[in-house]
Amino acid sequence: MSKQLLLGDEAIAQAALDAGLSGVYAYPGTPSTEITEYIQMAPITSEQNIHSRWCANEKTAMEAALGMSFVGKRALVCMKHVGMNVAADCFVNSAMTGVKGGLIVVAADDPSMHSSQNEQDSRFYGDFSLIPMYEPSNQQEAYDMVYNGFEFSEKLGEPVLLRMVTRLAHSRSGVKREDQKPQNNIAFSDDPRQFILLPGIARKRYKLLLARQDEFIKASEESPYNKFIDGPNKKLGIIACGIGYNYLMENYPEGCEYPVLKIGQYPLPKKQLLQLVESCDEILVLEDGQPFVEKQLKGYLGIGIKVKGRLDGTLSQDGELNPDSVARAVGKENKSEFGIPSVVEMRPPALCEGCGHRDMYITLTEVLKEEYPSHKVFSDIGCYTLGANAPFNAINSCVDMGASITMAKGAADGGLHPSVAVIGDSTFTHSGMTGLLDCVNENSNVTIVISDNETTAMTGGQDSAGTGRIEAICTGLGVDPAHIRVVVPLKKNYEEMKQIIREEIEYRGVSVIIPRRECIQTLARKKRSK
């Protein structure tokens, strides 16, 4: 087929569709969101009834995908790196259950924290779980790894983790597609107890997983994504992982003078690794993210060779890898011809003008600062996190999805009053409901603001699992309906909102305030589409 110009995320999505995908399961999170959106918009998705609805969170996504694999179908799970923390329970155990239908888990990491709370490296999850991993260096490899990865997963009987990074996910390149494959038919494991992790069965399956590690290493040694490229200058050997290889080649368009081991599949290929180590005086590791390979190498070799990278300061321990940092690491002059004009310098994001979150924060802050000087506001992950910035300066925490409610509870348990939580509708159904149940069970003295803009706005306006259901969920969890208060966050309603906030703070128990107004960006898109 002719090439298509695709984002890295789109290359993954198209490869999955071409490989006979039966379902994608995901919760939106930058930089992974476009994978699912591409599949949702593809004509083949509706034609072949491919599942593509958003899930409530990454845990439910991982579990549903494993269920699709259970019946022999091919499934794709997509999330950003912090979503791996949410999905980890099922993800780690899926290595022991194994799979029937091919299962690929895409973890999109965000070095430099462009839109994230941390810089964690998902390769540690794959290593911890003892399963094979892919790490593409370009969009074509991302496509090939997914297209062939489903068959690889089925051959091994294991899920496969594919690790992306922001720059690759959100940049474009020409991608050559392969022939369309049909979806798998329903089929079940020959072992009826494969997915039952009772301790006696789990112990056997764990021993089996451990026994297969040499097989996984051999697969890496024979992988087309791992390649030893010799060079005449043996003073330095370079291990270039994923997009790090791309950056290296930008500095050596005519070919690198040093021997290079390109890594695109894990576990590390021992044979090629030893070939590089035995022929070079020093080793430089180029990897985007944390020193995953560098740490393994230092404990793995045990032969006294010098290993350079992020740990010894050759490369920065934080932030993204890029062609300039790679140039400095290999001793090339960094010829930066252009400075960054002030017009394109980074500026902090801000809440949209006319956003309902603005009106919520204005009224909440006015009441709290004037009448409750000892107050603290525990916030969460979403657009409303920008309440931390001027002019609001309204929140005191933002840690992880759902933490606002449970941190407010813990603070109230410690004697804080008022203890206020601010959470969005999508984050509430993602990870906030269990925290609210804890509050109800102990009748905690907390005031919870569920700022409902009826969408998952921060990642582009995807459907929210809680739309039209927030009050019913709160009532079902045991909140007194008299203390579930819905308001419309508009200037004309400020006095009403202030009075409701005062009343619910004074109520000694669990109260929920729901400021509800549709996201103005979502509303604008709806109007444009008419």
Image (cartoon, rainbow, N blue to C red):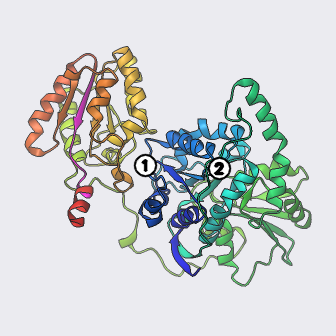
Q: Position of residue 33 (x, y in %)?
A: 46, 56
Q: Secondary structure at mark 2?
A: loop
Residue 435 shown left or right of residue 492 in the figure: right
Q: Secondary structure at mark 1?
A: loop
How many numbered discs sit on the rendered protein? 2
- Which residue is pictured at 30% across the width and 27% down the height? 474
Q: Amino acid at mark 2?
A: Gly
Q: Position of residue 210 (x, y in %)?
A: 81, 40
Q: Quadrant of the N terminus?
A: bottom right
Residue pointed to by mark 1? 54
The quarter of the displayed image where residue 276 is located: bottom right
Relative to 52, does residue 384 appear above or below in the rendering?
above
Any part of residue 310 in sight:
no
Query: Real-space Cα distance between discs 2 and 1?
Result: 21 Å
- Which residue is pictured at 32% across the width and 30% down the height? 473
Q: Is residue 517 magenta?
A: yes
Label 2 CA crowd tier, 10 Å (few <14, some 14–19, many 20+): many
Residue 363 shown left or right of residue 28 in the figure: left
Relative to 147, does residue 65 appear above or below in the rendering?
above
Residue pointed to by mark 2? 101
Q: Amino acid at mark 1?
A: Trp
Could you say which is closer to the camera, residue 471 or residue 394? 471
Q: Position of residue 455 (x, y in %)?
A: 31, 48
Q: Is residue 2 magenta?
A: no
Could you say which is closer to the camera, residue 210 or residue 387? 210
Any part of residue 249 in sight:
yes
Mark found first going from the N terminus, 2 or 1 = 1
Query: Which residues are drawn in magenta?
Result: 511-521
